Image (cartoon, rainbow, N blue to C red):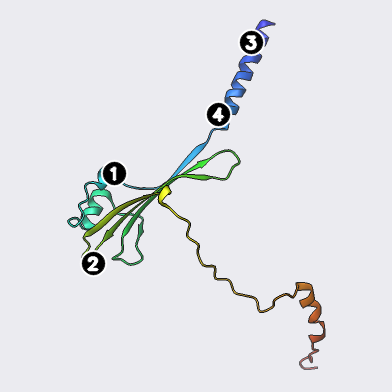
Amino acid sequence: MSNFFKTIKTGLAGLIILAVSACSATYEDHGYVPPAEDLEMITVGVDTRDTVADSIGRPTAFGVLQEGGWYYAQSRWRNFAYKAPKIVDRQVVAISFDKDGVVENVERFTLEDGRVIALSRRVTDSNIKGITFLRQLLGNIGNLTTGRLIGG
């Protein structure tokens, strides 16, 4: 009888450990940002696009124009059980170049530096205001015309 209770206690302890470990958060990393020591090797006013590409690699995102800056972005998301994913860290490194392709500036932005930008919504306004669908449907009943059958 004593061994039976030991087996049950061991089984329950195992189930509790399994349940607790199943509720732990998981993290997802997306993107790449060069480490600070690699960025320190870039000399403003001296390095070019080619030397930056050799030292830290090319980014996956470029500026709008070919002469635009290079942007390295990295995000870390926390997933916990049934809750929506939450961003816990974001870093963006922006390297800007002048018209000759020489490094002009190196900047690092974090999640704390971010701000919400309101994008303009481009929604077509309806020319029908204050009229419900049912009223539109009933209002068109008298507008039906009968057509002739072709060839008849």
* Circles 4 and 2 in contact, beta carbons < 8 Å: no
Residue 36: give its label.
1
Earlier in the chain: of badge 3 and badge 4, it is 3
Dot 4 surroundings within 10 Å: few (below 14), some, or many (20 or more)?
few
Residue 108 image position (x, y, % from top left): 33, 50
Cα separation between marks 4 and 2 = 54 Å
**Amino acid tagged 4:** Ser
Which is more foreground, mark 1 or mark 3?
Answer: 1
Cα separation between marks 1 and 3 = 54 Å
* Residue position for label 2: 99
Classify mark 3: helix, strand or loop.
helix
Dot 1 surroundings within 10 Å: few (below 14), some, or many (20 or more)?
few
Residue 64 image position (x, y, % from top left): 36, 66
Q: Is residue 80 visible?
A: yes
**Amino acid tagged 2:** Lys
Earlier in the chain: of badge 3 and badge 2, it is 3
Earlier in the chain: of badge 4 and badge 1, it is 4
Quadrant of residue 121 within the rendered picture: bottom right
Cα separation between marks 3 and 4 = 22 Å
Quadrant of residue 125 within the rendered picture: bottom right
Position above or below: 49 against 12: below
Residue 6: give its label.
3
**Amino acid tagged 3:** Lys
Classify mark 4: helix, strand or loop.
helix
Q: Is residue 47 left or right of residue 117?
A: left
Residue at 48 percent across and 56 percent down: it is 116
Earlier in the chain: of badge 4 and badge 2, it is 4
